Image (cartoon, rainbow, N blue to C red):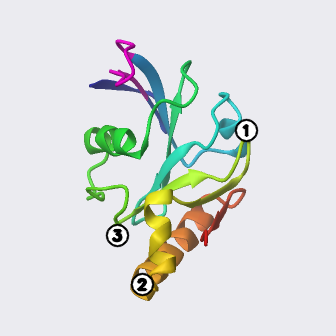
Amino acid sequence: MKFKLVEKEIFSGEMPSRYGRENIPYEVHVNPSPEDLNKYIVFEIRGYVNENGDLYVLFEIDSGGVFIHRDLLNILKDIVTEPIVDSPSQVGPGVCVIQEGYKSNTFTQSESVTSIRKEGKEEEINKILELFKKAKQKNPRLNFEIRN
């Protein structure tokens, strides 16, 4: 997997698809604006909030919804220097998030993490809230909410 820095906060590359296409072009945007979120037609954009509150979102350039959080984590291992989670279901040092609906400015924890609320894991819920507070400070035009 190769990527290149396109702009200060945008990385691009290609990734093999598990659905038969050889390579799918992608971009990873750091702290995107709402306008950036509407750049490509993608439903429920996958993202990751790191321990500093930076939001990384994965855009598939022309495939419309093939990538999953595991793909984003694999890309981030080549881009960022800080530690990231090993699995989309983990919380801390960051958390995987998903855009809440098409062209929404709201992100929630990924479906893999949603069960922690039901299981009453207060420590992990508090960690998510802390990460979301930091993300909101860096992305004031976006919303970050805990999903039930």
Does 76 sit above or below residue 67?
Answer: below
Using the image, tell me which numbered label, if any, was put on residue 121: 2
Most frequent secondary structure within the magenta stretch: loop
Dot 1 lies on which element?
helix
**Is residue 7 in view from this perspective?**
no
- The quadrant of the rendering that contains the N terminus is top left
**Which mark lies nearer to you, 1 or 3?**
3
Magenta span contains residue 17: yes
Q: Give whichever of discs 1 and 3 has the lower sequence position.
A: 1
Q: CA distance from mark 2 to mark 1?
A: 35 Å
Residue position marked by numbered label 3 in the rendering: 92
Tell me whether the residue at label 3 lies in contact with that at label 2, contact meaning CB atoms closer than 8 angstroms. Answer: no
Q: Residue at x 39, y 13 (%)?
A: 21
Q: Amino acid at mark 1?
A: Glu
Q: Residue 42: x and y, percent?
A: 63, 33
Q: Residue 26: x and y, percent?
A: 46, 26
Dot 2 lies on which element?
loop
Dot 3 lies on which element?
loop
Magenta span contains residue 140: no
